[in-house]
Amino acid sequence: MPKIVDKAKMRDDILDAAMTVFAKHGIHASSVSDIAQAAGLAKGTLYLYFDSKEAMTTAIVDRHFAALEAQIACGAPGETLNGFLEDLRRTMDIPAEQSSFHRVFFEVFGPSFASDAFTSHVAGFFDRLGAHYAERIARLQDLGEIAPHHHAPSIGRVLASMMDGVVLHRGLFDIAERRHQRMIREAVAVLGDGLRPLLAGPE
């Protein structure tokens, strides 16, 4: 009876091996043969899953951002600004072991940003994230939770950029936990103050 192969697991195992090889040697110095050896596979078997090293690179990036999107999009959207701010806080509050991946990410994939195709691929994640936040902001504006004069699409993209910066700095510069938490609190406080509708003054 032929052995049943879990194709999804096999793809993940290949990508894990590729990431290990890329981190050790760099993308350009790594070969498909190196990755096949690290994965314990014949080169021909690896090609059944990925037709090139570039396809593996894209798949690693897609897998990383898909996990982030699932984390951000999970749960009910909520109907209060405070709930929205708490979701933003949780998204920025990543553990140290997760944040360390970002340093590896830039060490490995930094040269790939010279490619317009790769850059556009990564930018797509932030476009989707910005659109997700814009939708939530517009909904909260309809509910009177956020001041109506804000341009939801612009604020959504700003939030995506700002949160990315906070998370990246945590990993790239080894920001201590206490300082990281303070940064998150201040960011959320500033956002809350800026987004809340202005209270009507005395007549």
Image (cartoon, rainbow, N blue to C red):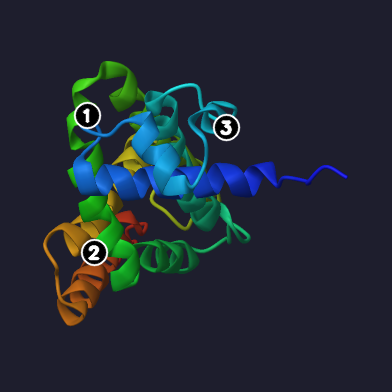
Q: Which mark is residue 45?
A: 3
The amino acid on which the numbered mark 2 sits, given as a three-letter code, is: Ala
Instruction: Single out the residue that lies furthest toward the top.
Output: 116
Q: Indicate the position of residue 143 as horizontal and vertical percent values.
A: 55, 53
Residue 108 vertical position relative to residue 29 in the rendered view, above or below: below
Going by the image, does 114 lie left or right of 156? left
Residue 202, position in %: x, y?
29, 67
Of residues 185 and 180, the one drawn nearer to the viewer in this rendering: 180
Q: What residue type is labelled 3?
A: Thr
Q: In which quarter of the image is the C terminus?
A: bottom left
Q: Is residue 137 visible?
A: no
Vertical comparison of 79 with 7: above or below = below
Q: Which residue is drawn at 34% across and 72% down?
A: 95
**Crowding at label 2, few (<14), some or many (≥20) Cα neighbours within 10 Å?**
some
According to the image, label 2 marks what residue?
A: 187
Residue 31 location (% of width, % of height): 31, 30
Pinpoint residue 79: horizontal percent, then vertical percent. 57, 60
Q: Distance between the residues labelled 2 and 1?
A: 38 Å
Q: Earlier in the sequence, mark 3 or mark 1?
A: 1
Kindly check if marks 3 and 1 are in contact, taking CB atoms under 8 A apart as contact.
Answer: no
Residue lying at 56% horizontally and 42% vertically, measured from the top left = 11
- Asked if residue 152 lies left or right of residue 43, the reply is left
**What label does residue 28 carry, if any?**
1
